[in-house]
Amino acid sequence: MPPKRAAAKAPAPKVGGGRGAALRKPVNVSPELAKIVGSSKLPRTEITKQLCVYIKKKKLQNPDNMREILAKNDPAFRELFGKDKFTMFEMAKLVQKHITAA
């Protein structure tokens, strides 16, 4: 008679929320940024998504360089970030000034 195999163990539950949990955690948004993204408390991923929607809606991308945002074409965006133009990569750093931990 063959030996009996041990029953397969269930995987251990993840501790700490898994990958990207910090990005999905809501943060407090400054009043200036809240005017654009629509809420005073959002996860970072949703902030980025709402900024992209706003950029596309207002046609703020440079047609010659799609990574560049032309904030000078929108007074609210220009006031929020304090620059006439910046790249998508710079935007993450500029947004950081307008969010705090919840």
Image (cartoon, rainbow, N blue to C red):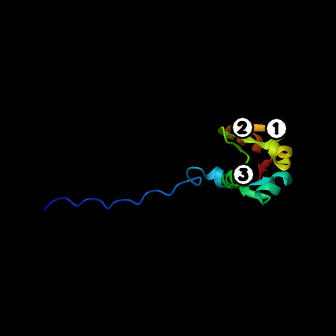
Q: Is residue 82 left or right of residue 21?
A: right
Q: Foreground: 15 or 64? A: 64
Q: Which mark is residue 9?
A: none
Please tell me which residue is depicted at 41% across the width and 60% down the height of the picture: 10
- Graded by Cα atoms within 10 Å as few (under 14), some (14 to 19) or many (20 or more), the crowding at tag 2 reads few
- Looking at the rendered structure, the kind of residue marked 2 is Glu
- Quarter holding residue 88: top right
Tell me the quadrant of the picture where the N terminus can be found: bottom left
Count all numbered tags in the image, as a single digit. Answer: 3
Give the mark nearer the N terminus: 2 vs 3.
3
Please tell me which residue is depicted at 79% across the width and 55% down the height of the picture: 36
Q: Is residue 90 above or below residue 40?
A: above
Please tell me which residue is depicted at 78% across the width and 48% down the height of the picture: 99
| Residue 45 drawn at (x, y percent) | 66, 52
- Looking at the rendered structure, the kind of residue marked 3 is Leu
- Looking at the rendered structure, the kind of residue marked 1 is Lys
Of the two numbered discs 2 and 1 in the rendering, the one whose residue sits closer to the viewer = 1
- Which residue was labeled with disc 1? 83
Give the mark nearer the N terminus: 1 vs 3.
3
Question: Secondary structure beneath disc 2?
Answer: helix
Marks 1 and 3 sit apart, C-alpha to C-alpha, by 16 Å
Q: Is residue 20 left or right of residue 94?
A: left
Marks 2 & 1, CB-CB < 8 Å contact: yes
| Residue 59 drawn at (x, y percent) | 72, 50
Marks 2 and 3 sit apart, C-alpha to C-alpha, by 13 Å
- Which residue was labeled with disc 2? 90
- Graded by Cα atoms within 10 Å as few (under 14), some (14 to 19) or many (20 or more), the crowding at tag 1 reads some
Marks 2 and 1 sit apart, C-alpha to C-alpha, by 11 Å
Q: Foreground: 63 or 89? A: 63
- Which residue was labeled with disc 3? 51
- Graded by Cα atoms within 10 Å as few (under 14), some (14 to 19) or many (20 or more), the crowding at tag 3 reads some
